[in-house]
Image (cartoon, helix red, strand yellow):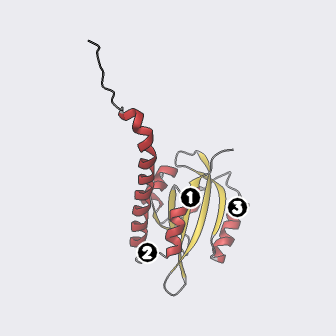
Amino acid sequence: MANKRKRYLSPIQSLDFYLDNFHSLCRKLKLENDLLELKGVLNRDLELSVVKTLQSVSYQALVVTDLERNIIWVNNGFHEMTGYSKHFAIGKRPTFLQGKKTSQKAKKEIRNLLVQQKRFSKALMNYRKNGEEYICQIEVLPLFNDNKEVTHFLAMEREQAAA
């Protein structure tokens, strides 16, 4: 009598199918958490354009500053990207991430763009807590209140892949 074996689909063989769904779900949960925290920090709902931007832009870290450029909130991705804790960053200016190789020209351009209170994108050299350099691609959005006045800036940041 021939020995018949049943064939089972191994979880490992089917993992790649579920991995895409898992990553998609993780991104969605991260976005929902970030939106919820942002609404709490700003004490208001976000404009639909800001929500759509966050849904469409790939970011690792979010940073909210007041008009004086003091950090009032960062998401969990900030710690993962920079090594600095949320509590350490709050109250500081994002310039604490800059160092010797940060372009003075890029810093000046960013300051000027913030004064214009318009959306912009820029890359500059930043430094992690351990001193490691990385190119940070930032996209900055001004955040408006109900009176259409800029109250904060939201920076969506990601590490730029090396060429």
Foreground label between 3 and 1: 1
Amino acid type, label 1: Glu
Is 21 on the left-hand or right-hand side of 112? Answer: left
- Residue 4, position as x, y percentages in the image: 29, 19
User: Can you name the residue that lies furthest to the top here?
Assistant: 1
First in sequence, mark 3 or 2: give its number. 2
Q: Which residue is at a point 61% across and 47% down the rendered structure image?
A: 133
Up-down: is 163 above or below 126? above
| Rendering quarter of residue 11 | top left
Q: How many marks?
A: 3
Residue of label 3: 106
Crowding around mark 2 (Cα neighbors within 10 Å: few <14, some 14 to 19, many 20+) is some
Q: CA distance from mark 2 to mark 1?
A: 19 Å
Amino acid type, label 2: Leu
Residue of label 2: 42
- Residue 106, position as x, y percentages in the image: 70, 61
Is 16 on the left-hand or right-hand side of 111? Answer: left
User: Can you name the residue that lies furthest to the front here?
Assistant: 1
Dot 2 lies on which element? helix
Q: Which residue is at a point 36% across and 32% down the rendered structure image?
A: 9
Residue of label 1: 157
- Between 148 and 128, the residue placed more toward the observer is 148
Q: Which residue is at a point 29% across and 13% down the rendered structure image?
A: 2
Amino acid type, label 3: Ala
Is 126 on the left-hand or right-hand side of 65? Answer: right
Q: Quadrant of the C terminus?
A: top right
User: Can you name the residue that lies furthest to the right here?
Assistant: 105
- Residue 120, position as x, y percentages in the image: 65, 68
